[in-house]
Image (cartoon, rainbow, N blue to C red):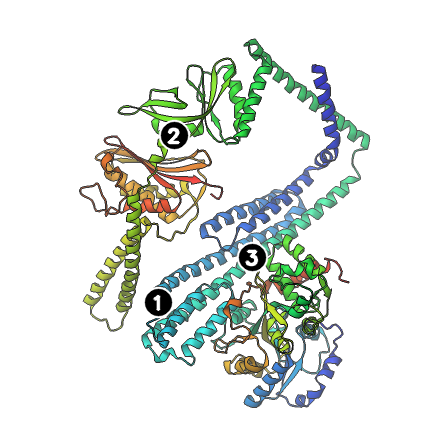
Amino acid sequence: MKPCHYLSPLFVCLLILPTSWANAENHTLNIICSAAPATCNVLRDSFVSIYDIPTNIVRMSSGEALDFIEKNSRSNNPTDISFDVWWGGTGDTHLKAVKNGLMHKFVSSNKMLLGWSTYLSDISDGNTVGVYAGMLGIVANKKVLTAQNLDLPNCWSDLGDPKYRGQLIIADPNTSGTAYTFLSTIFQIYDPFQRIQVLAEIKENILKTPKSGSDALLPVASDDAALSVAFIHDVPLLKYQNPSLAIIIPCEGTGYEIGAASILKSTEHLKEAKMFIEYTLLASTQNVLTKKIALQMYSNANTLSSPVYNNLKNLNVINYNFNIYSRETVRNDVLSTWNNLGNVD
Amino acid sequence: MILVIISTILGISTWTIILNNQYIEINLSLTKKEASRLELINNLNYASLDLNSLDKQRSEYIFLFSHNEISKEYKKIKKILTLSKDKYYIEKIKDVDKIINELDNFKSTMKLRNDYLFHKKTLQTILNNNIYTDYKSFSTEEINIVSSWELLKDALNSSNLIMLGELRRKFNYLISGPINLKNYSLKENRQINNIASGANGVFSTTRNIIIKNIKLEEHIYNIQKYSSVLIEKLEHSLASLKEERSEKVLPPLLKNQTLIAISVVCVFLIILLIGKLLLLLRRFNNANIKSIELLSQFNKIKNNLYENPLNNIFSKKNNTYNEFHIFISEILYKFLLRTQDIVLILDKNNNSVINSDVFNIYIKNSSSLTSHYSINNQNLVFTYTSKIDEKFILFPIDYIHKVGNFGHKILFLSPPENESKNIIKNDRLESLGKISGEVAHDINNMLSVIIGSLNILRESKYLVAKEDSRVIDRALFSADKSISIIDRLLTFACCQKLSPELVDVNDLIEGLYEVICFTSEKNTTITLDLSPDVPIFYIDPGQLEACIINLCINAMNAIDGEGRIIVKTSISHSEHCEILQISVDDDGHGIPKNIQTRIFEPFFTGQKKTDGQGLGLSMAYGFIKQSGGYINVYSEVGLGTTMSLVFELGDNQ
């Protein structure tokens, strides 16, 4: 979700150069994929093998994708490739693009979609649909904490405890979707007075603020820091390499992201675009992803449970308000509150 | 001496004025325009703060009450803007309209949410009737059926979309996964699916409730945002108005002159006040009471009272006040305002000078032409003549304080010992309640199954003959009637699930007036005597209505020929709290003493010919007990009965 201000049409052309052979075809489906690269590739390969529709995928983070789509819509000279689908990436960025009128109406005919998936569709007036969801959590390195004689934190507010001074790595919410979700979660849990106090204390404990959520997680995985905030389905792979990692669902409840899929207004292949999204909403497609590729919760009720989220006791989530926290003004308020809390060395 | 006092006061007031210089300056310096803008900001802040009371978890009644209050606040703000000729204000009407509009949207969403909540209750009842408890005897497939029912129950109680989604996934896996319920029982499987799926199913209903809750939060957020934007604009305009005028402010010398003038006026007023006080003290000198001695007496009283910090308000009953009484009552009123006790002031002949309101509560049922007080062995004896004979109430005396030289005394009393006897605490009723509750609960469960099955049978396409439908209808009618009896028994046993809300009791009784009149005979007069001081009270309104109607029906049955029924609400103060009483008073034949203890027993009726089942008072008894109150019965054969529902109001009410 990091906005990429240096992204230019030329840069995008360079990104898609390796797959430019596909552009020669008139019916090539061009997809911006904001999910993990492995997920994007599996989806493209299986879709091509079943439907035999040439498909081109460009990987961008949510922020980059939104920035690119917005700039392209404003530009008099859009890129020579017309993108059709934006798949994956946080729901709030999709909603923002919807609010700016950049998406095409698309309501899935799949009747097995879960409530959170259709909720995203409802609040976007049928312009986007939820494909996966993931919960936010605290990631702790038990080895680092034990070495310093520190306990595991239990709650978001514990992250502000002075005993964790210099132990916390949280990405910059101005550039990281994970960190923004964390901030807006705190905003939704605590009242205006408490949230300032909690966030100020947490900010005091921050060691450094990398640009992306994954960069914030790596030092904890490599025993260089004790605590971070991450989407918990991203942790098991790292935990496999470093068993001292622990996932904590904060006691106050936690926020979550909904990964969305939308059809771009500028699409020239509406039928194929719909086919692609419908394909990704099938239980059979999602089962392939949840078994091996990415461990989120998927939107089809018949898809298997994610091994990360199969314990119902851990699903202590808040009713995250995507509609409010995707608003530009609200986002600016949230970010300026955080930015004004003082600078981190 | 007087000069010293005056000069001290003069000095203090001048310093006070100087210290408060800035405050006065601010207030005096506000122009009319600025003051009105400031008032608007305050109103907006006030209304915005009140939004927090629109808690999504509250009941519809509380919501409507809060919503109306907040709407009124915003409409008031809009009116100020509309009536103003200030262009700046007229431009802001749009902003307030946006807020009012959002409030209306909030109301619509709330209504929808409540509809879903109502449906949720129905689903809950169905699910509760399908939860089994004895797992040991079940096969694997049966356990899966049980699990799916329990899973649906969990889903109905989900508070977030993620949890609901994962429960749906597990449910789908259970009914169509490796252990397929389809193979087990078509009927059970169809029943489970019907309740789970579809627009009115468990998952859809719960999803809609959660989404409406999110939407409600969003409305509140929007209203607060619009409000704060408007406040910001008004504050900005207020600041610029002040800035504009700051160039035209009075020179400092003139400001000082104004201050001096105000100081002089203040000092003059203070001197006047002191003069009046001295005049009053002189009057008491003339009455041979030394003012200093008297004041020290009252200081002693004050100190004693602060040691017993209680709360009380005095009423002045005696019309023949002399100066002493006026003085004593005024001073004591001030001193005792924060005290709570049964207080009585008697003169040397043991005539009451002042009764506290709390004391009046205890003697309220003892009103008679003749009554007198006497002190006997650390007890105050209040003797009065009742309709039949002479009675007395014994108040243990905690403390007597003698005042002045007139022989007046202030008595601090404990509640009368026999008071607790009026509260109905009957072990027999407790046991009956326990047995009735258990039996009623079991029968209720079985009846639910019978009604459910009859309903299914009634809608069956195989049912063709009209006569069959009639048989089922008759069975359903009887089952429904049984349910209502069971419901009342459950209420008696305090097992009924209450849905308390904030209720305006007076409104509720006024709403019942026509119903009560409709059920009464023509020659019975129904009168409402409702105290305006009755606060909004937290209670189940439906049950309270039923309870009052039952009391009224009993009163009507007790009246032969002409008669009157008074439904009364009153609020009084006891030792620690306020007491709300809802009473139904009739002038019927009364209840004989030998059956007064049995009137709350289920199926007990004192009427020879009646359609009633003898459950009305039992239901009332159980409901009032469950709601934290008690029923007071005062009845005399040939004179009438007063049934009072008594509630002690705590801080939360």
List the residue tagged with mark 1: B132
Sequence-wise first label, 2 or 1: 1
List the residue tagged with mark 3: B219
* Residue B514 found in image quarter: top left
* Residue B17 found in image quarter: top right
- In front of the other: A163 or A322: A163
Q: Where is residue B448 in the image (x, y as percent from the top left)?
A: 30, 62
* SS label for mark 3: helix
Which label sits in the foreground, 1 or 3? 1
Q: Which chain carries label 1?
A: B
Depicted A26 relative to depicted A238: above or below: below
- In front of the other: B453 or B520: B453
* SS label for mark 1: loop
* SS label for mark 2: loop
- Residue at 22% x, 66% y is B469
Neighbour class for label 2 at 10 Å: few (<14), some, many (≥20)?
A: some
The disc labelled 1 sits on which kind of residue?
Tyr
